[in-house]
Amino acid sequence: MIPVTKPYLPSREKLDRYIDGIYERAWLTNNGELVQQLTQRLEEYLGVENLLLVANGTLALQIAYRALDISGRSELTEAITTPFTFVATASSLKWEGVYPAFTDIDPNTWCLDPSLIEEAITPRTRALVPVHVFGNACDVEAIDEIASQHNLKVIYDASHAFGVNYKGESLLKHGDAATLSFHATKLFHTGEGGAIVFKKKEDLERAKKMINFGITGPEAIEELGINAKMSELHAAMGLCVLDEKESNHDARVAVWKAYERGLKPCGQLQAWSPHATQNCAYFPLALKSETQLKELLDVLAGEDILARRYFYPSLNQLAQLQSSCQKTCINSQNLANRIICLPLYVGITPSASQRIIDLIRSVA
């Protein structure tokens, strides 16, 4: 079977050495030595400051909302976001008492359309939560300008954008915060984990308190907090994966480029920002119709090949996320009905990728 994705497993020998150190120190959590090492190395690798490791990507979003003071309000609060994303982007907002005000996407880049944002702003709007979809950079200048004019916070969900540079610098530098997911199937992972990159040091310091129950000393509690800390065991996995990041990336690039060459005539490919690098985290393909998509899924499944509908359905259609600011998002709904992501991970052979291409060509 060829799954849609598979976790990258680094050198077991190296991982065991890190685990031996954990046993020697008997320090499993609470900002241990490996968490500190991984924080420093990721800041260097990504070219950012004010990075905070957390237990997962969903908590990264929730902590960012709280640290930037857009959640936990008594009055109705809204944040403008995209309906074409993983459910956690929006469900984490609603979990924090912030209603997701869905605004449609650009039909080519598949990211939030800046031209539609201003008309969606209301007196209840506190923030913008755009997503760098599949790692493709949003129109960050336009979004940041709108936020500045309307005094709104910007939290970029950058879960797919690990290692992406924009105009020569990390894409994660844009916004008041950018969040990352280090889930097992991500380009870089810690098994489970995530991170937040803050623009301001003071927001980082506040978030540090929040992820440790608000505790700042033996008898001091300064924030309403939660437990969102990353453990030493997860940091050990991250350090090993980071050591092998380049070989991992090169293997994915080979598969991604084969798909790109072979599938251009078969459907719509994402229009990539000309200013952003490509991290080859996903290979999405939008087919002509949902009927064609379902036919292709059946053909692939018949050959033990699993593709997946990322992202379906369009989140504005989910009952759990309905709100007073609900509206139709035609571009997102249309795309969600006809898009799949193809298998992409280290270990797919050239013959396997060509087999997938041939099967898609037989349908599309």
Image: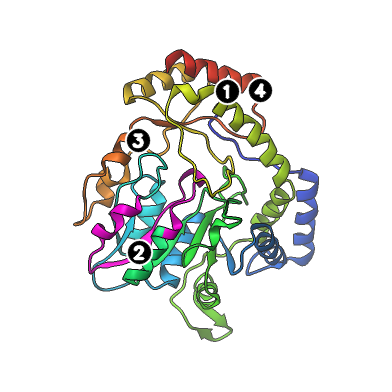
User: What element does badge 1 sit on?
Assistant: loop
Identify the residue at horizontal 73%, vertical 40% (top origin).
Answer: 247
Which numbered marker is on residue 350? 4
Is residue 126 highlighted in magenta?
yes
Quadrant of the frame with the N terminus: top right
Q: Mark 3 to mark 4: distance in Å? A: 29 Å
In the image, what residue type sits under mark 4? Answer: Pro
In the image, what residue type sits under mark 1? Answer: Met
Q: Mark 3 to mark 1: distance in Å? A: 27 Å
- As displayed, is residue 148 above or below residue 261? below
Toward the viewer: 226 or 241? 241
Q: Earlier in the sequence, mark 4 or mark 1?
A: 1
Residue that mark 1 sits on:
1
In the image, what residue type sits under mark 3? Answer: Leu
- As displayed, is residue 207 above or below residue 280? below
Residue that mark 3 sits on:
335
Q: Residue furthest bottom?
A: 219
Identify the residue at horizontal 21%, vertical 56% (top origin).
Answer: 325
Toward the viewer: 23 or 134? 134
